[in-house]
Image (cartoon, grey):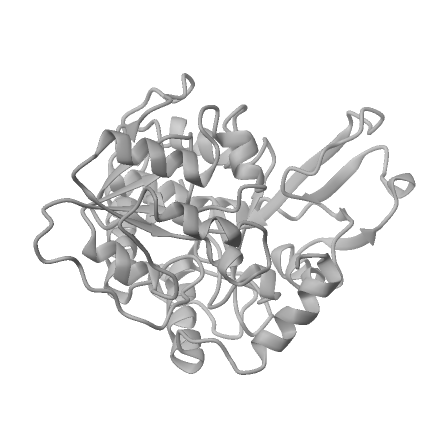
Amino acid sequence: MSVSLCVISKSGCKGTNKVLPKNANSLDVGVIYAWEFSTWKRSSVRQCFPGAHIKFISHASQIPTSGALLVWGMKPMEAWVSPDVKLLRIEDGFLRSVGLGVDLVKPMSWVIDKRGMHYNATSPSDLEYILSTGVWSKEELRRASRLRERIVDLGLTKYNTGKYSWQRPVERQLVILVPGQVESDASLAYGAPGICTNMELLQAVRLANPQAYLVYKPHPDVLAGMRLGKEGLEEALHWCNEVVTDVAMGDLLQLVDQVHVLTSLAGFEALIRDKKVVCYGQPFYSGWGLTFDINANARRNRKLSLDELVAGALIEYPLYMSRDGVGLITPEKALDELVAWRTVVGGGLPWWRKYFRMMLRWIVGVR
């Protein structure tokens, strides 16, 4: 499922690190028109497409009648956009950074999708196609297993934030983590056909598990005050036993028995740590026989092993960008750079970040 390719990088390529995702060999498409990308994302766009000429456009009149058009996430396409345009959608990857995207922390991983987007369960995506049709060799699955084990050993997750520890209740036999999400996110609009709010999820989990110890972790964007929803924390205590905030997700996942989600990536992060995961929505990792699905996706009827899921979702689907800004790297190299980054930054918040957030909240209108 992968091809051998060494892409521009100061760090070079050695051994199995030469194996980069197939996506890296299919993005040389000449000219790419990137529509309405903020200034801070533009260097990362260029880094993702080392063989292409990027033209950033801000008006619909600049969209070509053919060629490649790059947009962020599920940005809607107007009916008048030519059907000859090759549409590419781009979004954050699953091992993103040390810090939050809403804080304008530069990403180390993006995904590029020609069919749809991985969190849009209403239609197929490149990732769903990979997971539905992929055939991986023994060596590729060993690589996926090594990658998964190293992620767990290093305690890495999407954002790698949190500075406090958490202690599991001693006398409780069943401890369930319920991760909160940003309720305005597209992943809920396109991936939660049933209940679609944090409080509805908490209530459903409590109803199904009346004797369990429920731990609710609000989304870090909400806790940062950059997205709406912080006012719901008091209501959460009506349904859960405890609300945890500034705790590293990688550490927290190791201490719970189950994780119940709508579409949160925390469910995938729990799966690779061999936890039971119950999905009330239809995230990309559901439907493959690894999760307990409340709302099954009819298109997904294949049984995958955990290493097959990792091979598709963490090796073949994403692109990883070196922090030196030069080019693309392998997931193994990305782990090295994430750990080095986390060592320098730590899990806490730099002193200047709260002032920066105040300025951003004023700009984007979040009070």
Quadrant housing the C terminus: bottom right
Residue 291, visible in the rendered structure = no
Q: Position of residue 70 (x, y in %)?
A: 71, 44
Q: Quadrant of the N terminus?
A: top left
Side (left or right) of 220 relative to 144: right
Position above or below: 297 against 86: above
Estimate the x, y position of residue 251 in percent, counting from the top left: 27, 62
Q: Position of residue 236 (x, y in %)?
A: 39, 46
Tell me: residue 19, above or below residue 80. Answer: below
For image coordinates 50% across by 28% down, the residue present is 121
Which residue: 9% across, 58% down?
170
State the residue lying farthest toward the right: 61
Q: Is residue 366 left or right of residue 128?
A: right
Q: Is residue 108 above or below residue 298?
A: below
118 vs 4, nearest the viewer: 118
Q: Which residue is outermost to the top?
A: 298
Relative depth, front residue between 12 and 157: 157
Residue 24 in view (yes/no): yes
Up-down relation of residue 131 to residue 213 (above or below): above
Left or right, 67 with respect to 264, comes to right
Query: Image quarter for residue 107?
Result: bottom right
Image position, residue 203 (x, y; %): 35, 34
